[in-house]
Image (tube, grey):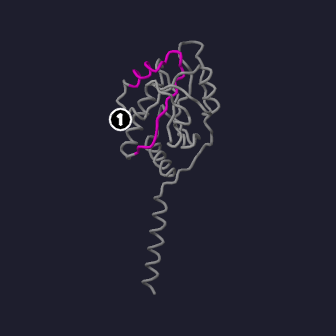
């Protein structure tokens, strides 16, 4: 009787531990990304529909940025390294240029080439729209601001990274500039990929 009780207790403990190990992603936001169809650094069209089926990490940057964009891009590169270490493959990285007048596909390609990214095939740096259009998408879909700085040639924008699920819904945001939670982002991406299987 005692032996059976101990076996039952051990089974219960094992079940609890296995359940705790299962990665279940918990969304913090529910912001649907509006449809778009833009051009990436390779001159390819990228739409919301193209991206559906895989989760993606998004940011807003521009190549002439003198402050936050270079560290944000480097941070995104570090996050991709963490993805690689976890063996993650089914994801994309999307950077929306907020200075589309200057950021042609060729300029964006040159910008990305400055960073030793682990896999540039996962990156889509987007352009091919007006600044008003991207400001509208940023505000409505990502709850962030994009606007010209009246005192310089710079553009004011948020510094968050956004995790978008397989259906095109923003489910979480993170600081993309300072104190970046690389491990948390990698774990969240892994859980989101697992949930989508």
- Vertical order, 137 against 191 (above or below): above
Q: Is residue 123 magenta?
A: no
- What residue sits 47% from the left and 25% below the top? 69
Q: Front-most of 53 and 133?
A: 53
Q: Residue 86 location, x and y as percent?
A: 38, 47
Quadrant position of residue 33: top right
Residue 114 picture location, percent across and down:
36, 24
Q: Residue at x 40, y 25 (%)?
A: 112
Please rate how many residues cluster around mark 1, counting C-alpha atoms within 10 Å: few if below 14, some from 14 to 19, many from 20: some
Which residue in the protein does label 1 denote? 118
Tell me which residue sits at (43%, 78%) in the image: 7
Tally the numbered discs: 1
What are the residue bounds of the magenta stretch?
Answer: 88-112
Give coordinates of residue 154: x percent, y percent: 53, 16
State the residue in front, 70 or 138. 138
Is the residue 87 above or below the residue 135 in the image?
Answer: below
**Residue 111 image offset from top left, x and y in percent:** 41, 22
Pick whichever, 124 or 185, lies toward us.
124
Task: Write the residue at 62% across / 42% down.
Answer: 30
Q: Secondary structure at mark 1?
A: loop
């Amino acid at each position: 009787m005692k032996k059976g009780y101990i076996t039952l207790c051990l089974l219960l403990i094992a079940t609890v531990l296995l359940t705790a190990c299962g990665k279940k992603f918990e969304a913090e936001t529910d912001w649907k990304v509006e449809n778009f169809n833009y051009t990436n650094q390779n001159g390819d069209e990228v739409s919301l529909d193209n991206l559906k089926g895989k989760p993606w990490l998004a940011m807003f940057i521009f190549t002439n940025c003198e402050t936050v964009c270079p560290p944000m891009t480097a941070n995104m590169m570090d996050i991709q390294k963490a993805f690689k270490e976890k063996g993650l493959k089914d994801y994309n990285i999307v950077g929306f240029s907020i200075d589309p007048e200057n950021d042609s596909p060729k300029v964006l390609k040159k910008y990305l080439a400055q960073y030793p990214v682990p896999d540039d095939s996962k990156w889509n740096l987007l352009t091919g729209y007006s600044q008003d259009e991207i400001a509208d998408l940023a505000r409505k879909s990502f709850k962030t601001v994009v606007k010209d700085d009246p005192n310089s040639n710079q553009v004011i924008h948020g510094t968050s990274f956004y995790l978008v699920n397989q259906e095109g819904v923003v489910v979480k945001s993170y600081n993309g500039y300072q104190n970046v939670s690389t491990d948390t982002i990698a774990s969240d991406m892994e859980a989101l990929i697992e949930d989508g299987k």
